[in-house]
Image: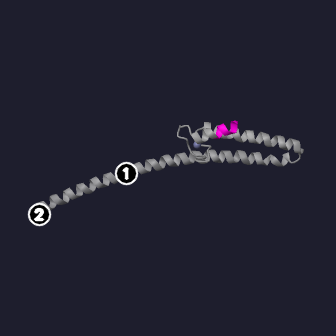
Amino acid sequence: MKDRNFLDTVMEFEQQLESMQTQFEALKKFVALMMEEHQTLQMENHYLRTRLEEVLSQQETLPALATLNAAEEHKEEVIDVGEGYDNLARLYHEGYHVCHVHFGTSRKGEDCLFCLSFFDKQND
Ligand SMILES: [Zn+2]
């Protein structure tokens, strides 16, 4: 009977190892997923920081514009709209969504109908 108990213990231990292996595989997949997401977020964060610095440095030049006459200020506004559009086009080209649905997230190499319809509207 002692041998029987020992065999049970060994088989039980084997089952525990198999169960742990399954859990470990799931954990590895989870870690891989988290690392991928982490990298995507880092890229997006880096891009948005760069954009923020660009926008802030553009704003620093605004006080100088205040000295210009009204007509010239109006002209600058028109140019700014064009730059905003170019920046969004560049952002899309670099692989990010510019649509309100997924703004700032990676397109994962796929075209987005929301983004494209946004550009269509701008071109009208
Ligand atoms: Zn999109």
Q: Nearer the viewer, residue 116 or 43?
A: 116
Q: Mark 1: few, some, or many residues within 10 Å (few <14, many ≥20)?
A: few
From the image, tell me which residue sits under label 2. 2
Q: Is residue 80 left or right of residue 102?
A: right
Identify which residue is drawn at 27% across, 53% down.
Answer: 18
Q: Identify the secondary structure beneath mark 2.
A: helix
Residue beneath disc 1:
26
What residue type is disc 1 on?
Ala
Q: Percent from the top left, x then y, of residue 17?
A: 27, 54
Quarter of the image for residue 121 reads: top right
The location of residue 78, given as percent across then percent down, is 79, 41
Quadrant in the picture for residue 8? bottom left
**Highlighted magenta segment, given as a residue range:** 118-124
Name the residue nearer the viewer: 22 or 110: 110
Q: Quadrant of the C terminus?
A: top right
Which numbered circle lies on residue 62?
none
| Residue 98 picture location, percent across and down | 62, 43
Which quadrant would the N terminus be assigned to in this image? bottom left
- Is-magenta flag for residue 119? yes
Do tag 1 and tag 2 residues touch (Cβ < 8 Å)? no
Q: List x then y, in percent, for residue 19.
A: 29, 55
Q: Quadrant of ligand 1?
A: top right
Q: Is residue 27 left or right of residue 81?
A: left
What predominant SS class does the magenta segment belong to?
A: helix
Could you tell me which residue is drawn at 53 percent across and 37 percent down?
110
Residue 92 visible in image: yes
Compared to 3, does 76 lie above or below? above
Q: Is mark 1 within 8 Å of ligand 1?
A: no
Q: Residue at the spot x=70%, y=47% of the render?
A: 53
Which residue: 32% across, 52% down? 22
Within the magenta stretch, is there residue 85?
Answer: no
